[in-house]
Image (cartoon, coloured by chain):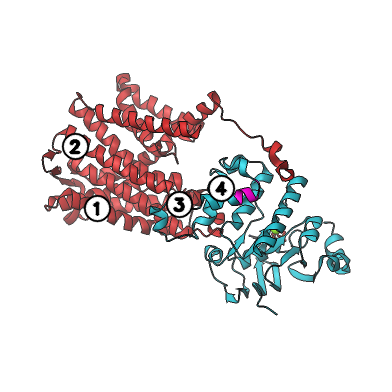
């Protein structure tokens, strides 16, 4: 039974990966660009899913970490660094700043924490806009090169897509390792009952900080990919609205589910494109769908899938009241 | 006399105007099963939380095996070999029983980094399964803790306190809301654990039958103060206890 399920999961992953490989073939530049940004936002949402979905810490600042990753990569690649060296620096910076952003979470929770992270997002936005000497202010930065890897050059949209796909697979494997490790268990314990977790030896302060730091580093990685993808960045691309959008991806996909962010990013990015044929109505339909989702399926699309599966093929349940007498056996 | 495994000295704790714990002192010897009883609101849980670093007492000191532990965080105390349960049911509902139990032991094994790069179960599956068997929860190993019956969750909750192999365990109303069969099962398991491992217990409990048959010594708290201490038989016969506790309509 469990063996079957893990086999099914493996087949599903292989099919999805294959689909991701063939999806852009024969498509125009625009579709390939949209698919690439789906991957990039999936990475950002994956990070927020760790912080919020697994560890239960709300953050409205994921776009600001994309900004930190994007600007670091932009400034360094403009100065002649290779992307492969610039990106890790952006990640480390995001990890460090994420760690700092975690400190308020040790004191405040829920709505208050949301406000603190929201303020942080605004702070980063203002710094990017005002420190013109470094960031180019409202004009932003342009002309960042796309990386070359010997004979593999990413200047073509399709090549850049495969480059991004490779990074996404790598980032997903790392995330898979994290959530399956004892750290992942500690993150979930922090989400479900921090007081009990602490009493069982979990250093909840350290694990809270790590949840922010790792989630932020994923935001940084997404930013490091946005820079060569768009080759033009400005503060407006990393405002609060974008943090909310990433939050929406996590929630719509299924907060705390491993594949939720991919699904969520897909819906949030691709659905408006798909609904474009409805002309002026697409925003209305889209917004209505989001509201219906949030109200009726708070566990997201993956949670909805799970509920349907339980309805159609219920798993055998041991009746609690019948086994209580186990003491007498 | 041997050094007590737990020594509580002059603990005071107030909430606003309420003096929940007033100058409480007692010792616990290794291997003892000590009962802590008293009417609702007499400060038993507050006392536990002061001992275990969940609350900061205004006054007083706590020593575990002769080591001053006042001011330590709950997780640090747990690493010194002190396990506990809370009065409220405290399992991790969206994790399987096995994961609940492994979590309760994983922070005691290896370094922070080894817990990221090492095996997913921190090498604890077998030990966890043994404990699950000990509490006769085998058939529920892979069930989400949140979907178990109340009594089963209480058992998982109690089992977690033992996973790290503690030398001292404080249980806050382990029998609260548990049916009679389950109660007998729990008591029998606690006695067996104490006999096999020499683990020391301090047990808060309202069920008199449970306390009197389980404990070797009983302390009675009323309005934050220790009013009696002795063997179950002595406590039963103590007029002060009958007056404050049994006469108090409990
Ligand atoms: N967090 C708290 N804030 C305010 N008052 C509290 C708090 N915890 C306990 N109390 C009060 O302290 C007293 C002792 O409570 P408690 O320790 O829970 O008693 P017991 O466990 O013996 O039933 C009660 O009067 C209770 O209302
Ligand atoms: Mg109590």
Q: Is residue B133 magenta?
A: yes
Q: Which residue is labeled 2 in the image?
A: A160
Q: Determine the secondary structure under disc 4.
A: loop
Determine which of the numbered discs, if any, sits on residue B92 in the image.
Answer: 4
Q: Chain of mark 1?
A: A
Left or right position of A233 against A16: left
What colour has chain B? Answer: cyan
* Label 1 with label 3: CB-CB less than 8 Å: no
Q: Is residue A77 visible?
A: yes
Q: Earlier in the sequence, mark 3 or mark 2?
A: 2
Q: CA distance from mark 3 to mark 2?
A: 35 Å
For label 2, being within 8 Å of ligand 1 is answered no
Q: Nearer the viewer, mark 3 or mark 2?
A: 3
- Residue lying at the far bottom of the rendered structure: B1
Quadrant position of residue A272: top left
Indicate the position of residue A172 as horizontal and vertical percent values: 33, 42
Left or right position of B218 against A155: right
Ligand number 2: quarter of image: bottom right
Q: Which residues are magenta?
A: B131-136
Q: Earlier in the sequence, mark 1 or mark 3?
A: 1
Determine which of the numbered discs, if any, sits on residue A88 in the image.
Answer: 1
Which one of the lettered chains is coloured red? A
Q: Residue at x 32, y 55 (%)?
A: A95
Is disc 4 surrounded by few (<14), some (14 to 19) or many (20+) residues within 10 Å?
many
Left or right position of A305 against B5: left
* Label 2 with label 1: CB-CB less than 8 Å: no
Q: Is residue B89 visible?
A: no
Q: CA distance from mark 4 to mark 2?
A: 43 Å
Q: CA distance from mark 1 to mark 3?
A: 25 Å
Is disc 1 surrounded by few (<14), some (14 to 19) or many (20+) residues within 10 Å?
some
């Amino acid at each position: 039974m469990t063996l079957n399920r893990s086999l099914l999961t493996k087949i599903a992953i292989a099919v999805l990966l294959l689909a991701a490989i063939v999806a852009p073939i024969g498509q125009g530049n625009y579709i390939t660009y949209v698919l690439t940004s789906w991957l990039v936002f999936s990475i950002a949402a994956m990070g927020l899913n760790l912080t919020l979905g697994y560890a239960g810490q709300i953050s409205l600042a994921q776009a600001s970490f994309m900004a930190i990753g994007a600007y670091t990569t932009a400034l360094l690649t403009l100065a002649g660094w290779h992307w492969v060296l610039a990106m890790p620096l952006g990640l480390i910076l995001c990890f460090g700043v994420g760690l700092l952003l975690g400190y308020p979470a040790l004191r405040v929770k829920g709505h208050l924490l949301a406000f603190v992270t929201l303020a942080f997002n605004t702070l980063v936005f203002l710094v990017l806009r005002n420190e013109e000497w470094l960031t180019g202010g409202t004009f932003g930065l342009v002309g960042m090169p796309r990386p070359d890897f010997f004979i593999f050059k990413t200047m073509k949209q399709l090549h850049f897509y495969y480059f991004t796909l490779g990074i996404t697979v790598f980032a997903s494997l790392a995330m898979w390792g994290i959530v399956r490790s004892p750290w992942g268990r500690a993150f979930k314990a922090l989400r479900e009952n921090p007081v009990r977790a602490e009493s069982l030896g979990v250093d909840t302060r350290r694990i809270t900080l790590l949840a922010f730091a790792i989630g932020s580093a994923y935001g940084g990685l997404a930013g490091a990919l946005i820079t060569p993808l768009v080759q033009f960045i400005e503060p407006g691309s990393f405002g609060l609205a974008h943090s909310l959008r990433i939050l929406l991806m996590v929630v719509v996909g299924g907060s705390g589910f491993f594949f939720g962010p991919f699904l969520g990013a897909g819906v949030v990015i691709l659905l408006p494109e798909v609904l474009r044929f409805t002309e002026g109505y697409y925003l209305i339909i889209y917004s209505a769908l989001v509201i219906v989702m949030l109200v009726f399926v708070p566990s997201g699309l993956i949670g909805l899938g799970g509920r349907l599966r339980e309805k159609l093929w219920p798993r055998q349940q041991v009746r609690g009241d019948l086994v209580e007498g186990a003491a007498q056996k | 006399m041997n050094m007590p495994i737990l020594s509580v000295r002059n603990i005071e704790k107030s909430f606003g105007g309420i003096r929940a714990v007033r100058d409480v002192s007692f010792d616990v010897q290794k291997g003892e099963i000590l009962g802590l009883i008293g009417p609702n609101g007499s400060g038993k849980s507050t006392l536990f939380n002061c001992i275990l670093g969940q609350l900061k007492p205004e006054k007083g000191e706590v020593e575990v095996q002769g080591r001053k532990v006042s001011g330590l965080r709950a997780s640090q105390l747990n690493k010194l070999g002190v396990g506990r349960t809370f009065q409220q049911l405290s399992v991790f509902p969206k994790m399987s029983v096995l994961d609940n139990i492994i979590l309760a032991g994983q922070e005691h094994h290896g370094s922070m980094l080894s817990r990221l790069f090492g095996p997913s179960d921190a090498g604890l599956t077998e030990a966890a399964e043994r404990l699950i068997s000990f509490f006769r929860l085998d058939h529920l190993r892979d069930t989400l803790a949140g979907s178990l019956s109340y009594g089963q969750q209480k058992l998982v909750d109690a089992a977690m306190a033992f996973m790290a192999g503690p030398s001292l365990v404080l249980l806050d109303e382990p029998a609260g809301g548990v049916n009679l069969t389950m109660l007998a099962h729990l008591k029998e398991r606690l006695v067996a654990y104490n006999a096999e491992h020499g683990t020391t217990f301090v047990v808060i409990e309202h069920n008199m039958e449970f306390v009197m048959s389980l404990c070797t010594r009983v302390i009675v708290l009323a309005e934050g103060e220790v009013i009696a201490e002795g063997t179950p038989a002595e406590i039963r016969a103590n007029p002060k206890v009958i007056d404050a506790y049994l006469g108090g309509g409990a």
